[in-house]
Image (spheres, helix red, strand yellow):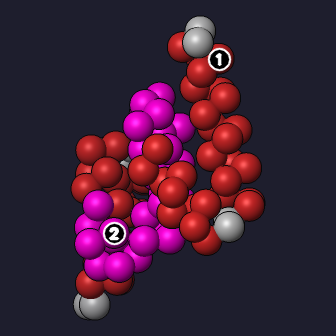
Amino acid sequence: LSSISTIGIEVTQALASNDDIRLAKAIDDAEKHRMVVHAARMRIVLAQRTGNPAPLELARPVLERLQDRQFLRRLEEVSAALQMKSGI
């Protein structure tokens, strides 16, 4: 299998097994293999699943550079939900 296929399988298995540590590693691997857009978008999912906003700040500059309005909107929605949840 190619590294792209392997990363896709890792992401899928991590999501299916609710393994956020494995998901974070798969996202990092995707970024190392130049799947930067996919990694940025998956960081939004990771932040939502873990309640940790840190991945959003890693995703934001990539999505802004691409002018990816759809996923920037999703990032803002997740960010707002996390802020409400934490009482900030």
Q: Where on the picture, by quarter, is residue 55?
A: top left
Which residue is the site of mark 1?
Answer: 84
Which of 57/77 is in front?
A: 57
Dominant SS of magenta comes to helix
| Circle 1 SS class | helix
x then y, percent, for residue 18 = 39, 43
Relative side of 27 to 1, left or right: right
Q: Is residue 57 above or below residue 38?
A: above
Q: Residue at x 73, y 50 (%)?
A: 73
Residue most extreme to the bottom = 2
Q: Quadrant of the C terminus?
A: top right
The crowding category of the residue bearing disc 1, from other C-alpha atoms within 10 Å (few below 14, some 14 to 19, many at least 20), is few
Q: Is residue 38 magenta?
A: yes
The amino acid on which the numbered mark 2 sits, given as a three-letter code, is: Glu
Q: Residue at x 31, y 51 (%)?
A: 24
In magenta, the rendered stretch is 28-56
Relative side of 64 to 46, left or right: right
